[in-house]
């Protein structure tokens, strides 16, 4: 997919990463292309799945998500249909903001944002209970120094 993108497509994507609401006319000015040509390329990028959607990057604290944790999880055994369905449902929870299969001792790494330690405990407990029955290790984030979401970089606590 990346090989299919030319420099113009990449310039359009860079502009959209900085501000998804930027008008095609503004992008056209930035990259010296006509507005209809930019709009056509944006449509093509959307149809081909390069652009997956448009979203607002909201400060998690505004939603009360003050607790951030990474949960490593290991599953011993093979996953049957019921377990796979439970894992999919778990990953669809609002608190699960990232889910990755990983190499090493663990099977998954989840990034969790929640409003309290009590709700984090419920999430970890759900992972450890059937049908998932995973062994977990949780790392609670004390301070975030840099986070990149949707092309937006935010800097938080100073590095000590």
Image (cartoon, helix red, strand yellow):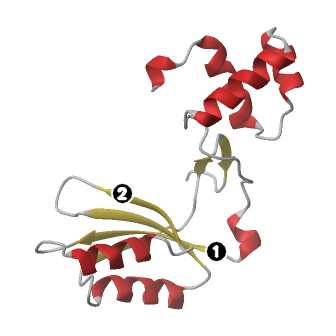
Q: Residue 95 carries which label?
A: none
List x then y, in percent, for residue 39.
78, 25
Q: Distance between the residues labelled 2 and 1?
A: 22 Å
Q: Quadrant of residue 14?
A: top right
Q: Residue 100 carries which label?
A: 2
- Residue under the image location 16 percent in, 62 percent down: 105
Task: Let me know if residue 14 appears in the view.
Answer: no
Q: Quadrant of residue 65?
A: bottom right
Q: Circle 1 is placed at which residue position?
A: 66
- Residue under the image location 55 percent in, 33 percent down: 48
Label 1: state its secondary structure: loop
Give the side of residue 50 with respect to residue 22, left or right: left
* Residue closer to the observer: 78 or 133: 78
Mark 1: few/some/many CA within 10 Å (<14, 14-19, 20+): some
Label 2: state its secondary structure: strand
* Residue closer to the observer: 98 or 136: 98
Count of marks placed on residues: 2
- Give above or below for 25 relative to 148: above
């Amino acid at each position: 997919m990346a090989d299919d993108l030319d420099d113009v497509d990449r310039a359009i994507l860079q502009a959209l990463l900085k501000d998804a609401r930027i008008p095609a006319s503004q992008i056209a000015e930035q990259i010296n292309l006509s507005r209809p040509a930019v709009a056509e390329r944006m449509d093509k990028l959307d149809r081909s799945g390069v652009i997956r959607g448009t979203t607002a990057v909201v400060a998690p604290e505004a939603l009360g998500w003050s607790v951030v944790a990474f949960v490593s999880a290991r599953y011993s055994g093979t996953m049957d249909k019921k377990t796979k369905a439970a894992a999919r449902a778990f990953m669809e929870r609002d608190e699960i903001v990232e889910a990755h299969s990983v190499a090493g001792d663990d099977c998954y790494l989840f990034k969790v944002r929640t409003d309290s330690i009590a709700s984090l405990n419920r999430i970890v407990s759900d992972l450890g209970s059937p049908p998932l029955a995973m062994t977990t290790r949780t790392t609670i984030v004390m301070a975030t120094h840099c986070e990149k979401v949707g092309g937006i970089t935010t800097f938080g606590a100073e590095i000590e």
